[in-house]
Image (cartoon, rainbow, N blue to C red):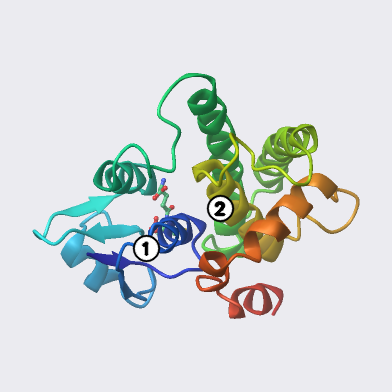
Amino acid sequence: MKLIGMFDSPYVRRVAVTLKHLEVPLEHANWSVGADFERIREFSPLGRVPVLVLDDGTALVDSAAILDAIDDQVGPTRALLPASGGSRREALRLISLAMGAGEKARDQLYERMVRPPEKYHEPWVMRCREQMHGALGLLEVACRERGSAAWLVDDRLTQADITVSCISTFLKESLDVFGGDAPYAALQAHVARCEALPEFRATHAPWFAAAMKS
Ligand SMILES: N[C@@H](CCC(=O)N[C@@H](CS)C(=O)NCC(=O)O)C(=O)O
């Protein structure tokens, strides 16, 4: 299977970390939604990444649908989203908070990067920022309550750890959310622990933070 999209996208990255963690062989098409837009649209007219092209040529879009297909392929004992009950509910709660924070960050960045400067609308950016920090605050509580040696759900790494870490790293590198007066100490510690794992290190885009600061 082929994964299309660059690892600076937390949505692409959470799929890549998942595939590497599960040791599913991965062909990576490191294509940009800017420069490679038309090439991406040959596989998905939607023109968004990630796209996962299966061996039969089917192109899956949206990281949630892609992760569901991967979990289904590896089977219930290896699936990274807990199968049922409180663990599944808690994992989905944390994943949804992280994904929501990521979307609110993306809206802030697009306002700055995509819109003409005269159309930049500060009240919208501030609203998105407040919503993003609202979600991060709840993730901080979850990390604090679990303690520094624990995974976010159950006693193993799950999709909650992967998604929370990929999104948090993206927010740190693009919007400096761990700087200033919002340190999120427990969340930062959990993310650092995940980012030290080989599957995270292998998918980190080290140039991204520098590019965002320039
Ligand atoms: N909900 C989608 C979000 C994907 C997404 O927003 N991808 C961005 C890159 S971070 C993209 O492709 N942007 C280009 C565009 O939407 O035109 C997912 O989880 O896969």
Q: Which residue is mark 1?
A: 23
Q: Residue furthest right?
A: 181
Callout 2: helix, strand or loop?
helix
Taking the spot 27% from the left edge, 41% from the top edge, the residue there is 72
Asked if one can make out residue 119 in the rendered structure from this viewpoint, the answer is: no
Residue type at the position of mark 1:
Glu
Q: Is residue 78 left or right of residue 126?
A: left
Distance Cα–Cα, label 2 vs label 1: 30 Å
Crowding at label 2, few (<14), some or many (≥20) Cα neighbours within 10 Å? some
Residue 153, position as x, y percentages in the image: 60, 35
Tell which of 145 and 28 is nearer to you. Answer: 145
Question: Which residue matches tag 2?
Answer: 106
Sequence-wise first label, 2 or 1: 1
The kind of residue tagged 2 is Arg
166 relative to 20 in the view: left or right: right
Which quadrant of the view contains residue 12? Answer: bottom left
Residue at 47% x, 55% y is: 14
Q: Quadrant of ligand 1?
A: bottom left
Position in image of residue 170 (x %, y %): 61, 60
Instruction: Tell me if mark 1 has few (under 14), some (14-19) or many (20+) residues whose alpha carbon lies within 10 angstroms of its own.
Output: few
Ligand 1 is within 8 Å of the C-beta of the residue at disc 2: yes
Q: Nearer the viewer, residue 122 or 16?
A: 16
162, above or below 95, in the image: below
* 191 or 34: nearer the viewer: 191
Q: Residue 59 sits in which quadrant?
A: bottom left
Contact (Cβ within 8 Å) of mark 2 with mark 1: no
